[in-house]
């Protein structure tokens, strides 16, 4: 079985695959202060709660946009799963032509999402990932990763509004009864939800002018389903798109992963 780990700024998403089948998945908070042992024990508890066996893991793949946590999870993987993780980087075979400048600057999560979306839907395709930042990525019909756009995520936008305006309360991100809010809470909810949906539609519309009107639009990330009902441009939500991309990348690069494990064993 394969353990796939995607480390984001706010959450860490984990999944266990048996072949292409996702057997279990979890979302935990990203905490820089946690040690490899703390993360390892947490994962073992999650495995036990889902009737999964850690000793059945024969491969680990890791995508991270939080550099300090990469060695922490590498150590955790070696100690608790006896596997040297395959780390998503610019040297990896993705099957895409990376047009980003410079290529290594594109976030690992963006590449992983692009790989999964292109394999499933072909191109052109636009991926919208609702994370700490909301990212828009474009892949051409020829499988070229063209780049995209990055905007503040809806949650941190709401936090900025709360912190920057002293009279505004902190509110739940939820759909209000109407666009025209009749109190402060519903007015803020309307602005955040419908305003952000408008941002998404505007960005996708502009990207389609460059990529082509037939580009399929796939959304993923924690807030994707909330925004989906209010947009006109998103075709489908794939909640586990990043995990699916990690599984695909592991299959493409597992010879390299096994070689790394052998090298690590020799050095030890």
Image: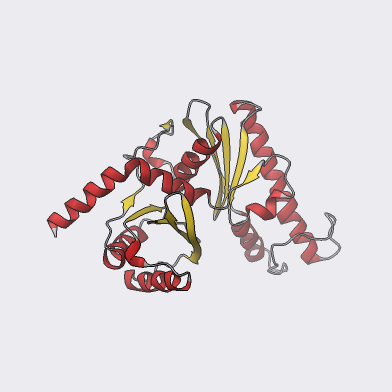
Relative height, residue 216 to residue 135 (above, below): above
- Could you tell me which residue is drawn at 63 percent across and 56 percent down? 223
Relative height, residue 42 to residue 3 (above, below): below
In front of the other: 162 or 199: 199
In front of the other: 261 or 124: 261
Relative height, residue 185 to residue 207 (above, below): below
Quadrant in which the N terminus appears: bottom left
Regarding residue 6, the answer to whether it shows in the image is no
Relative height, residue 152 to residue 93 (above, below): below
Image-quadrant location for residue 172 = bottom right
- Indicate the position of residue 17 as horizontal and vertical percent values: 43, 55
Left or right of residue 171: residue 111: left
- Indicate the position of residue 19 as horizontal and vertical percent values: 42, 50
Left or right of residue 23: residue 166: right
In front of the other: 37 or 152: 37
Image-quadrant location for residue 97 = top left
- Could you tell me which residue is drawn at 37 percent across and 54 percent down? 62
- Indicate the position of residue 268 as horizontal and vertical percent values: 14, 60
Which coloring applies here? secondary structure
- Indicate the position of residue 256 as horizontal and vertical percent values: 26, 44
């Amino acid at each position: 079985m394969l353990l796939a780990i995607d480390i984001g700024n706010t959450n860490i998403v984990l999944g266990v695959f048996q072949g292409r089948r996702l057997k279990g998945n979890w979302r935990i908070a990203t905490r820089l202060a946690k040690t490899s042992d703390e993360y390892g024990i947490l994962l073992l508890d999650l495995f036990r709660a889902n009737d999964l066996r850690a000793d059945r893991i024969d491969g680990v793949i890791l995508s991270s946009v939080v550099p300090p946590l990469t060695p922490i999870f590498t150590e955790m993987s070696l100690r608790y799963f006896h596997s040297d993780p395959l780390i998503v980087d610019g040297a990896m075979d993705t099957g895409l032509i990376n047009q980003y400048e410079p290529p290594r600057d594109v976030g690992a999560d963006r590449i992983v999402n692009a790989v999964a979306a292109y394999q499933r839907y072909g191109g052109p395709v636009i991926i919208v990932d609702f994370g700490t930042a909301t990212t828009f990525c474009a892949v051409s019909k020829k499988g070229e990763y063209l780049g995209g756009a990055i905007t503040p995520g809806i949650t941190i936008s709401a936090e900025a509004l709360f912190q920057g305006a002293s009279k505004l309360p902190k509110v739940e991100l939820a759909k209000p009864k109407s666009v025209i809010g009749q109190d402060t809470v519903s007015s803020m909810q309307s602005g955040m939800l419908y305003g952000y949906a408008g941002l998404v539609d505007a960005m996708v519309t502009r990207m389609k002018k460059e990529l082509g009107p037939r580009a399929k639009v796939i959304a993923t990330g924690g807030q994707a389903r909330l925004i989906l009902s209010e947009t006109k441009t998103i075709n489908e939500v794939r909640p586990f798109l990043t995990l699916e991309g990690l599984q695909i990348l592991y299959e493409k690069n597992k010879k390299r992963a096994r070689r790394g494990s052998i090298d690590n064993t020799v050095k030890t």
